[in-house]
Amino acid sequence: MSDETTLAFERVEMRSAATAKGAPLDRISVRDYTVDVEIGAFQSERGKRQRVRFNVVLEVSRHAAAATDDVDQVLSYDTIVEAITHQLSVERMNLLETLAERIAEQILINPMAVRVFVRIEKLDRIPGTLGIEIVRSRVGGRNVTAMADKPAATEEEVHPLVVFLPNKILHSDALKGWLNAIENHALPAIICLEKTGLEIPDTGLAPVNRRMGLLSIEQNAWVLAGKDSRCVVVDSRTELDWAMKNGQLSVWAPSKVVLDAVDKTDADADTPLALAQWFARAFSADHISVCGDFDGAEDSNRLQVVATPDAL
């Protein structure tokens, strides 16, 4: 038991060596790679950066790089660092477990990668460290971190139709006609809304007011879903990506994407069109279509005011 306990708290390269089976594999590692990042599920961790330390050991298949001194034949250390950097840049994450899984999955895409140990630790939460460690490997040439029910990846980037639907249309008899046109558009559609007409209490705290405003938009999203069963409320990048690839008519609930974004925006529920434009850029939409009249909406190369459903 003492040996197992000692091994459990060893550095990842020691765990890699101790658990190796069969012919020995080469290992590359990145040790004590520390970055400041906003991460965490607790409200006290939002809006604050904390030090997070990464230790990664990657076991790789045998290659001729040492004999030939050819850098093109070796799996670079940059593969590890780039995976960390990329996953931190995609979106704000709540869990170290999620971050570790995504880093491992990206690294194991490389056909030379066999097994990877990922240890991530928070250095500022307690006097010691808090962390997670995972081990993931390739089996039969495939990455076992991939989930069976995960939508198939596509190399082609999807450019959605982002539509801003004002309250005056949401609560009008014209709604069905607009939704028919949006649903029948050649591009997968995501509908953005403004906040409800209900009064939102002013707490005197900007972060709280902002969240309450975003929740007001989400109330409107559920109002729309209640009016038409074709409309599905979605709040995460993963679900939005799936919806775009599968033709679902989506209504954006903004809180999670806005609060978890690495590329922060000052737009909020009081500037809903600016918020929708930020969202459109984040999801690689060519432009945003504004249904009917909305104060502040003017035609531009990125913003298209559409007078009737037939003009979508």
Image (tube, helix red, strand yellow):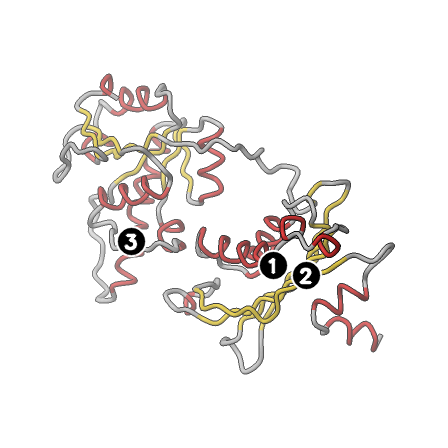
Q: Residue furthest bottom?
A: 127
The image quadrant of residue 303 is top left
Task: Name, please, the residue furthest toward the front.
Answer: 68
Amino acid under disc 3 = Thr
Whole-percent x and y of residue 215?
A: 32, 50
Point 22% across, 29% down: residue: 291
Amino acid tagged 1: Tyr
Going from N to C along the chain, the mark reached first, 3 or 1, is: 1
Residue at screen point 28% across, 41% down: 276
| Residue pointed to by mark 3 | 265
The answer to whether mark 3 and mark 2 are in CB contact below 8 A is no
The image shows residue 31, relative to residue 307, as above or below, that is below
Between 203 and 163, the one lying in front of the other is 163
Q: Position of residue 56 (x, y in %)?
A: 64, 63
Q: 184 or 124, which lies in front?
A: 124
Q: Quadrant of residue 237?
A: top left
Report the residue marked by disc 2.
Answer: 28
Image quarter where the C terminus lies is: top left
Q: Quadrant of the N terminus?
A: bottom right
Label of residue 77 in the image = 1
